[in-house]
Image (cartoon, grey):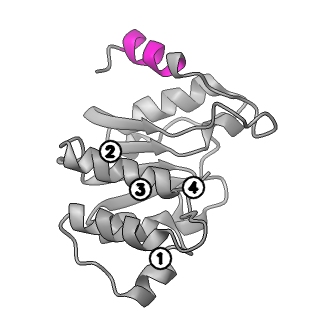
């Protein structure tokens, strides 16, 4: 799915309410790109950078960012970025989320683990969510932004919000 306007607006909200205050290391499921229709990126990205107290890039750099990897935005926010994907794109850790385990050097190392439209493409849902858990350090944040309405031919699974409430409860997450 990638990071689009809704995700950027969510990140602004999470930073403003303090949820992102201690985030320094990100593990992203899938080597995500920014996905912005038309010219809507400008005010959203400016708001994001200002909310994170970052320098706002000049217009030309913003135009390049919106066409590129989400990695560039995370790093501009001052976050240490990692991702995993089978293709190795953007220096991704090459893993198959259906079958692989989290390598020991990555266990419980990340403050923020994101799933922006990746796990719905997996057959092995158990392993996917286990990996999210295993990458996330104690007290870290797991963020799932996934399709659940109107994506009948997208991936293998459509999620319902009660799944995440149940996963959180079962695993004693807050």
Q: Quadrant of residue 174?
A: top left
- The answer to which of marks 1 and 3 sits earlier in the sequence is 3
* Label drawn at residue 65: 1
Left or right: residue 17 compared with residue 111: left
Contact (Cβ within 8 Å) of mark 2 with mark 4: no
- Above or below 97: residue 93: below
Q: Mark 3 highlights which residue? A: 8
Q: Which residues are magenta?
A: 163-171
How packed mark 3 is, by other alpha carbons closer than 10 Å (few <14, some 14-19, many 20 or more), is some
Q: In the picture provided, is 64 more to the left or to the right than 118?
A: left
Label 1 Cα crowd, 10 Å radius (few <14 / some 14-19 / many 20+): many
Q: Residue 119, how many percent across, how many down?
A: 62, 37
Label 1, label 3: how many angstroms apart (C-alpha)?
13 Å
Inter-mark Cα distance, 2 to 1? 24 Å
Residue at left 59%, top 22%?
160
* Local crowd size for mark 2, using a 10 Å CA cut-off: few (<14), some (14–19), many (≥20): many
Disc 3 is placed on an element classified as helix
**Per the image, is 167 magenta?**
yes
- Looking at the rendered structure, the secondary structure element under dot 4 is loop
Of the two numbered discs 2 and 4 in the rendering, the one whose residue sits closer to the viewer: 4
In the image, 149 versus 82, the foreground residue is 149
Please report the residue visible at 65 percent of the width from the left and 43 percent of the height from the top: 96
Sequence-earlier tag: 2 or 1:
1
Compute the Cα span from label 2 to label 4. 20 Å
Q: Which residue is nearer to you in this view: 136 or 69?
A: 69
Q: Nearer the viewer, residue 110 or 100?
A: 110
The disc at residue 2 is 4
Dot 2 and dot 3 residues touching (CB under 8 Å): no
Position in image of residue 114 (x %, y %): 45, 44
């Amino acid at each position: 799915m990638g990071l689009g306007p809704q995700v950027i607006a969510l990140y602004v909200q999470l930073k403003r309410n303090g949820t992102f205050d201690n985030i320094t290391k990100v593990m992203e499921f899938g080597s995500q790109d920014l996905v912005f229709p038309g010219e809507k990126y400008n005010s959203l990205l400016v708001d994001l950078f200002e909310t994170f107290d970052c320098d706002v890039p000049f217009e030309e750099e913003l135009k390049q960012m919106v066409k590129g990897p989400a990695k560039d935005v995370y790093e501009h926010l001052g976050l240490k970025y990692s991702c995993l994907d089978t293709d190795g794109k953007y220096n991704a850790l090459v893993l198959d989320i259906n079958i692989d385990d989290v390598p020991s050097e990555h266990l419980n190392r990340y403050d923020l683990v994101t799933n922006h439209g990746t796990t719905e493409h997996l057959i092995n849902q158990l392993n996917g969510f286990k990996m999210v858990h295993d990458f996330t350090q104690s007290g870290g944040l797991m963020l799932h932004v996934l399709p659940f309405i109107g994506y009948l031919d997208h991936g293998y699974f459509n999620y319902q919000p009660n799944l995440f409430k149940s996963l959180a409860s079962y695993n004693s997450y807050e």
